[in-house]
Image (cartoon, rainbow, N blue to C red):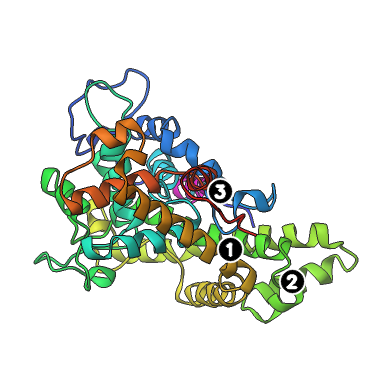
Amino acid sequence: MAVEGVHARMPYASDPSASRGRLHAEPPSRTRNNFRRDCDRIIHATAFRRLKHKTQVFVFHEGDHYRTRLTHTLEVAQIGRALARALGLDEDLAEALALAHDLGHPPFGHAGERALDSCLDAFGGFDHNAQTLRVVTELERRYADFDGLNLAWETREGLVKHNGPLTDRTGAPAERYRERGVPAAILAHSALHDLELWSYAGPEAQAAAISDDIAYDAHDIDDGLRAELFAVEELAALPLVGTLMAEIRARYPALEPARFVPELIRRLIGHMIEDVLTASRGRLEALRPRTADDIRRADAMVIGFSVEMAATDRAIKSFLFDRMYRHDRVMRIMRQAEAIVADLFANYMAEPQALPPEWRLTLPADDKGAAHHVADFIAGMTDRYALIEHARLFATTSDLL
């Protein structure tokens, strides 16, 4: 199903000319608005280029056609812009948030994140959203006047809160942060430029977040089939997916598998996008927001799936968790990847001289500061560089096979 054409900009879209600003004052661009400028800065960031060689599910050497963090990010950006355009939101802000949403992920996908979280257990753990904020506010060092990319408030706020509020209005941690608390990096930055952690993110961040879900569902099905972790017939029991498969076979009874799967993925993405548009327009009509802040202060997410599609999304994710993410072949490689990350962390902590000179010279003296500094270095690695570093420091290194 095609997304409807360009719609008029709605009053509740984020306005680049009315941005709450940047942490460091800069003269305005003569050719780009605030949100377009953020998109361009993210695309030119070192961390963005590294996404090319960071694992989505399959490690880089397993095949040329599997998604990487970069190709996933581009797919999320495409869906995010389509949703923003159809809903009359700011396309540039939606794109910026989609492009930057995975910058904080370490090598080897969720395996690398689990390993770093374990390594930092005594120091608050590792959180990829907090790491993304650190990348765009501190770790990128491309400008003479400031660290980070000095992105607009709306971009930083959206990166931190795209999955919902982090605290309640009293500041008490909400949802997944109740056990460990909100990451210190997020609290520290919010103290400098209040991100209103108690509210929802703006509409463009919500559009980018649901685009991430759509891309995951559709493209992980595609990659799982390509890797032969499950057969296409097994998808027939899934809600919506089975219906789409029956429709394709009824219309194209002799369609070869090489065309069947892309047709299925295309239709699945289209149906999910149409559902988000219909459900979101209904919620917008009920809320009648006049500004983006009205959407931030709503009682629930405004841009997202219907109740029925949310259930379909959960069913697809449950299937993928059991049949793909927890598949013996994937788990075997991920366990090896976790060990590589843990080895690197332990080695750098015990022997700081193994760090590159620029990282060694800025290593904090205290254990907590040093641990987070080492984690920053490892989180920035690509899969390939992590393997190279491990081979340099250790007698044997897994081939991740």
Q: Which residues are magenta?
A: 71-85
Secondary structure under tag 1 reads: helix
Q: Is residue 294 above or below residue 28?
A: below
Q: Secondary structure at mark 2?
A: helix
Q: Which badge, 1 or 3, comes first in the chain's sequence?
A: 3
* Mark 3 burial class by Cα count in 10 Å: few <14, some 14-19, many 20+: many
Which residue ends up furthest to the top in the rendered image?
30
**Is residue 24 shown left or right of residue 268?**
left
Q: Which residue is mark 3?
A: 75
Give percent across and percent down for residue 392: 49, 42
What separation in Å lies between label 1 and label 2 (alpha carbons)?
31 Å
* Dominant secondary-structure state across the stretch colored magenta: helix
Q: Nearer the viewer, residue 28 or 44?
A: 44
CA distance for labels 2 and 3: 22 Å
Magenta stretch encompasses residue 78: yes
Q: From the viewer's perspective, is residue 92 above or below residue 187?
A: above
Q: Which residue is mark 2?
A: 245
Find residue 31 and report its horizontal and vertical position in percent: 37, 20
| 7 sits to left or right of 162 | right
Q: Few, some or many C-alpha atoms within 10 Å of disc 1 (few <14, some 14-19, many ≥20)?
A: some
Q: Choose the circle earlier in sequence order: 2 or 3.
A: 3
Closer to viewer: mark 1 or mark 3: 1
- Which comes before the other along the chain, label 1 or label 2? 2
Residue 354 visible, this orientation: yes
Residue displayed at 48% across by 56% down = 340
Q: Which mark is residue 333?
A: 1
Disc 3 residue type (three-letter): Glu
Q: Quadrant of the N terminus?
A: bottom right
Residue 277 seen anywhere in this rendered image of the structure: no
